[in-house]
Amino acid sequence: MAEYKIPLIAVVGPTASGKTSLAVEISKHYGAEVVSCDSMQIYKGMDIATAKPTIEEMQGITHHMIGFLAPDEPFSVAQYCETAKEIIFDINSRGKKAVLAGGTGLYYSSLVDNVEFYPEKTDFEYREYLKSQADELGSQFLLDKLFEIDPESAKTLHVNNLGRIIRALEIYHTTGKTKTMQNEQSLKNPSPFDVIPICLDSRNRQFLYDRINKRVDIMVKNGLLEEANNYFKMNIGRTAAQAIGYKELEPYFKYEKSLEECIDNLKMQTRRYAKRQLTWFRRDLRMNFLYIDDYSDYEDLLKAAYEIVERGVKIEK
């Protein structure tokens, strides 16, 4: 008898593709609750820059893992997976379904594939030693050293990616296991979820880019400048600095660039981020793609999404 797995609907994709709206509609259709899969929406107050769903956009659907953490508190992918898993288990225990929604690929893959995280060990002295070797002998010397102990990891790294080369060597130095071995062992336990993944995409790249540009304009109109300026004034550290929508505006607040230049850069960086998001999700062979520019009628897109869900796992309405 096959082991029971919890059905988990996932709505992922690039920014401005319509994930929030689709996740809400699916949740309304199946009586589900939404679990956010966004590494920035977890923080309190970072609302406009992260496109956090408003009360109106939630339409009465319960949303989890949104705005619960202070912006100066670190939160790892391991913590995300542990917390999200507990929430999904609880939703399931109440006889309901969960809809995972967001665009942070690492959070999504780590959760649905049940990645096991190892405690990180750091040896700052050894790290500095490796940096001095790179300064003296070049980063190729360190990459060659990595090839000797972990060729699989070494093959994935460019010679200029010194930080990751050093980290891979440090992992072996501190644990006695290569990064490749850790990656393999991290997937040894099967996932508790039977995931039904939907990725929103666009056949015409410019169609998505136009949506991104329009969203940025709306964010600015809705108070992005004030929100970003407040965070820089509070000096809360690197969390806000990481959020797309804040760091691009910093030169404006420092009188280094015009507002128009900063907004143009914000649009460009958001488009680049969307491209990286799609690259991540396209690697997942389980993914069901819905192309938003195929549907002039939103009801047709919803119908296609419901068909994907019902092909995946029988869901009682």
Image (tube, rainbow, N blue to C red):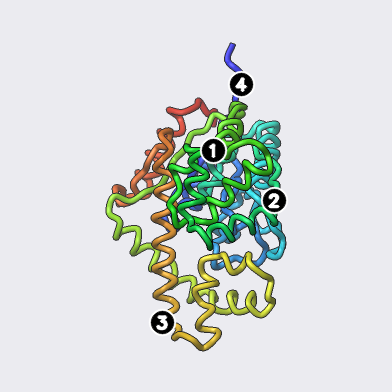
Q: Which residue is mark 3?
A: 260
The outermost residue toward the front is: 136
Looking at the image, tell me whether mark 4 or mark 1 is earlier in sequence order: 4
> In the drawing, does residue 310 fall left or right of residue 34?
left
Looking at the rendered structure, the secondary structure element under dot 1 is helix
Query: Residue flagged by tag 3: what amino acid is it?
Result: Glu
Front of the two marks 4 and 1 = 1
Q: Residues within 10 Å of mark 1 (few under 14, many from 20)?
A: some
What mark, if any, has residue 4 been given in the picture?
A: 4
Q: Nearer the viewer, residue 203 or 147?
A: 147
Q: Nearer the viewer, mark 1 or mark 3?
A: 1
The x, y position of residue 168, in whole percent, is 57, 46
Q: Position of residue 112 (x, y in %)?
A: 56, 36
* Quadrant in the picture for residue 90: top right
Q: Earlier in the sequence, mark 1 or mark 2?
A: 2
Query: Residue at the top extreme?
Result: 1
In the picture, the disc for residue 122 is 2
Residue on which the image places disc 1: 149
